Amino acid sequence: MFTQIYLKRFFLYSLMLCSSLLLVGCGKSNAEDKQRAHITVTVTHDGAPVTEAELRLMMDGKGEGAMGVLNEAGQTELSDVVLGSYTVTVTPPEGTPDNPAPKKDYPNIPQKYRSMKDTSLKADVKAGVNELTFDLKE
């Protein structure tokens, strides 16, 4: 009888140990291991800064992305962007429910740059500091 109790305990403890070791191996995701970089992006339209816009980068098929709001110099800085090739869009500001963006045409953002399927803008983010410039043309 004592042997059965010890066997049951041994089996239970062994099962708990194996489960713990398995969970420890699953604790760290690959997302934390990805190399990242800092990027500065400047967007102009016919040489003038685009000051009211949002810039989005989306890595094709990987689910990685980044987003920034352009300032008065037409620039945005993004930190911790995963290294790789991105499709870039520039869209009018969306605002927030508490502070909606003004409803206007934004002629300095041509339609073809507002959609992931239509844009021709691409960015390759490499290790180190990246400075990207895009001039939006009709």
Image (tube, helix red, strand yellow):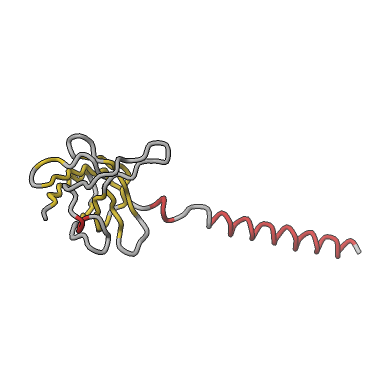
Residue 78, quarter of the rendered image: top left
Residue drawn at 28 percent across, 41 percent down: 69
User: Which x, y percent locates residue 58?
Assistant: 30, 56
User: Which x, y percent locates residue 108?
Assistant: 16, 47
Q: Is residue 57 visible?
A: yes
User: Which image quarter holds the C terminus?
Assistant: bottom left
96 vs 28, left or right, is: left
Residue drawn at 32 percent across, 49 percent down: 66
Q: Is residue 86 visible?
A: no
User: Which x, y percent locates residue 20?
Assistant: 63, 55
User: Which image quarter holds the N terminus?
Assistant: bottom right
Front residue of 52 and 37: 52
Front residue of 33 and 84: 84
Front residue of 19 and 53: 53
Residue 73, quarter of the rendered image: top left
60 lies above or below 131: below
User: Which x, y percent locates residue 135?
Assistant: 12, 49
